[in-house]
Image: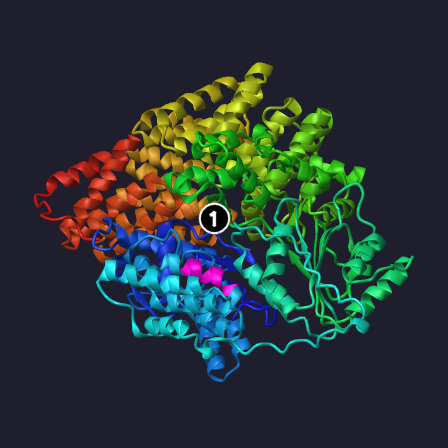
Amino acid sequence: MEFRETPPAPALRFQVLGPVQAWLDGKQLALGSPQQQAVLTMLLLHAGRPVTTQDLVDGLWGDRPPTQAVAALRTYVSRLRTVIEPRREVRRPAEFLVSVADGYALQIPAESLDMTVFEQLAVEAATARGAGDLDNAHHLLVRSLALFAGRPLTGVPGPYADSQRLRLAERQVSVAEERCAVALDIGLHAEVVGELNALTAEHPLRERLRELLMLALYRCGRQAEALGVYTDTRKLLIDELGVEPGSGLSAMHSRILAADPALALPAAPAPPAATRDEGPAAPPAPAQLPADVSDFSGRTDMVADLSTVLMNATGQAVVVTSLAGIGGVGKTTLAVHVAHRVRAEFPDGQLYVDLRGAGASPADPAVVLGDFLHALGVAENPESLEQRAALYRSLLASRRMLILLDNAQDAEQIRPLIPGVSSCAVLATSRSRLAGIPGAHLVDVEELTPAEALALFSAIVGEQRVDAEPEAAMAVVTACGFLPLAVRIAAARLASRPRWSVSDLARRLADQRRRLDELQLGNLAVETTIGLGYGQLSPAEARAFRLLSVVDSPDLPLAAVAALLGVGEDEAEDLAEALVEANMLETFSAGRYRYHDLLRLYAQRKNERIGDVEEQQAATRRLLDLVLPTVRNAAQAIEPDDQLPEPLNPLGSPGLLFPSSQAAREWLRTETALLHSSVEAAVGGPSELLRPAVDMLIVLHSLVEDPTHGPRVRRMLETADRNAEASGDSAALARVHFAFGTLQSIAIDFQNAEQSLRRSLGLQDPEDMTVMRSMAANTLGIMLSLTSRPAEALPFLEQALAISRVVGAPIGEARLLGNLARAQLGLGMVETAVRSVTEAVATARASKNGPCLADTLYQLGVVLSAADEPGTAVGHLRESHRLYQSQQNRLREGYTLARLSSSLLAAGQQAEAAETAEESLAIGLEMDSAYCQGLANAALGEALLGLAQPARGLACLREAHAVFTRLGVPEASPVADLISQQHTEPSAPPAP
């Protein structure tokens, strides 16, 4: 029931004893908005029991739910399912977050939730204490409390979370009280005084804590202070509550006054007195650990796990635990903190040395052994390394000691410093993983979580300043890459400048070019720390470290690494793995590599200082030569017969090939960030970079319909526009304006979209029979049709259709026929429109092209619904929806469901129409598509009116009208007419 090394921790793990967090296979999951976390919290704390939809709404919003609370709740649940089960196939039932009657249940193993583990450990501790096994009881209570990573349910909103936060905080204090009581039973009175002081300050009216503090002080020989605690407590109780202390506290006061012998623990037997003939007294046990930091924050699970490993050092061989990580990640701080936590388990002492492994002159193991032997009482050291190591092992053979080897260079440096017996334990830190030590427990120390970084920042700066500017504080720790050293430096700078606000510091760190300069204080500097690791690299490794930062991508697949470095994949993998070993790169799955944010900035700064622009541009071109043809191959795998726009320059390689459309889609989902980053690196460069970058944007845009990429793509296009204009590249400029037009039309910015598309066509030769010209004319025609100008749209659509037939693109022809049908419908040519779109569907079916068939079926459904054939339209829209689902095209799913809802409504199926519209609305909210939300609300409102729910129906219609009016689309008019036809106004706010 607990998070142990053995058996392994569950693959899916949740935390509520602190900020709400989750991990899957060791990787932290993004749990979304605070409201979404609140839903997860309610499901987790019900421990697999069903929670009704109404209870979830009440727990999240109380008595003031939003008008579309249930739809929002379904969206949160849908997103949580995607996060918790990322590999779940489409339409396959959820395994963990399941629908149960009118609600949901989260069915996970008990050991997957920290709260359950906490309670189980507390129960085991009570059992052990009852059996007289006090040491084990104390150990179990320490472990249970170590699961708390801060205030329970930090930042989670809602009345349910508020009540549970109080309950969990009360349980934490109760178990802490029990832990202190057991600690006193086993003689740890000195160790608990500080904790009891803190607990009584936080809970001043809790008499049991005061009683324990009095006993701890008394046993430490501080009788006057113990009696002072009683005096202060009695005054507080009388002043605050008007009552005298309870019997337990009063009895403790009386017993201390009477010097009750039972209050003192039995004295440990005194060692026999030494005589003069026995020689000099033995030296004291070495206690060389550096001081622990007072503001240590986070890493609760890791501290508990490391403590357990070290305390259980009783096996057949010595326990060697190695902490590895990048410079500044807090390896030394963590090691020292853990060592202090377990030092009582090593009564014969603790040895410490800084091995200076990251510097120019690492410590000589022979010299280190000489220092250790001196600390152990050896007056004269042997000469050789081997003799010193043998004597060191002999002296430690009968002792239980902890050896902390900090900042090791490699396994060879620490090998002579490892004792030979299992009663001792070794804790080492290094920038590289010390895999050469047999049986070593290797631990990778990563950056802090956002909550942990914020806690560290608050501990140094002060909670009041952070609470006043929480968003700015999060921006600061995010800019620090959650690296403890960077957070500590930033916080110390702010703490030393009382006139600065947190926002002032956040603004200074927002400039990536200055960030490393800002992260230094006195002799502490992030850049210097990273530079020590860079200085250990070979020339080839240093070049690879720099060149991989040319593209600002979250991570890089091995193929991209090879392209950037201009080497084969085997050599690229060797170089990348060497950088991982040196903790200058990270890898979280085979064949994928990434930088820590500050390491990337350091690499980019090295590129600037070295100034080899040609090599950097050559690396970018090699990457484009790989990814552009690969994106085109993906497009062909998804739609085999579709015509792609002709590349401006010849392709530089065949690219990667895909065995199926599913493989192509999976690659696109995985590499979208890399592809956009490649374009960003190229659009400001010379023509040989600009042209393939623009080509990539156009093909990629047709494959990845995600509105959230819009702002980033717009910035790229603005750069490309300026570059193409300055260089006089009209062909590239025409494509830039085409891409602008499509982007603007998706954003429903039709006025600017029309200008961009007309300019794109104007920059192309009117006699050109190219796919590019056909695409521009088609997009302009669609946009004119959408804005109720079908007569203007028709010539452009006919022109595009003619080009498509000349170049031999049946897929393009099918889509164009569907678009043409919508324009013909707008002109009242209903029969002609039906014929056109029917031909479109037939052409698409013949091609066996799934995406094209889905598009044309959608168009057919819309046209038939407008032609008063809703029953027939329903069948085609259902088929279109199934196809979009199989293609995982969420936005088109949302549009199709909205149209399907309208057709169902026209066919008299109001209940199913309402349900379908709800599903469409959830997708519209998920994809942040205003137009989809408008269509869904319009259909839902009309369906609810038909179901005699006028209040909700009117609320949905008004929401749809507001959306359509804001977008400036013609759908606003019929919705306004429908609203005006209703004479019943709601007398109260609409129901959720």
Report crowding for label 1: few under 14, some 14 to 19, many 20 or more residues within 10 A (C-alpha): many
Decide which of 971, 377 is in the foreground and name it: 377
Residue 185 vertical placement versus 39 (above, below)? below
Q: How is the image coloured?
A: rainbow
* Image quarter of residue 102: bottom left
Q: Give coordinates of residue 299: x percent, y percent.
A: 54, 56
198 drawn magenta = yes
Which residue: 63% across, 24% down? 685
Residue 178 vertical placement versus 327 (above, below)? below
970 drawn magenta = no
Which residue: 35% across, 60% down? 203
Does any portion of residue 426 appear in the rendered image? no
User: Mark 1 sits on what residue?
Assistant: 455
Decide which of 706, 399 is in the foreground and name it: 399
Q: Which residue is outermost to the right? A: 383
Decide which of 314, 160 is in the foreground and name it: 314
Q: Is residue 54 left or right of residue 306?
A: left
Q: Which residue is outermost to the front? A: 276
Residue 554 vertical placement versus 169 (above, below)? above
Decide which of 675, 906 is in the foreground and name it: 675
Q: Which residues are magenta?
A: 191-199
Q: Give coordinates of residue 146: x percent, y percent.
A: 50, 63
Does any portion of residue 463 appear in the rendered image? yes
Task: Kindly state the secondary structure of the residue where label 1 is placed.
Answer: helix
Q: Give coordinates of residue 656: x percent, y percent.
A: 66, 44
The amino acid pointed to by label 1 is Ala
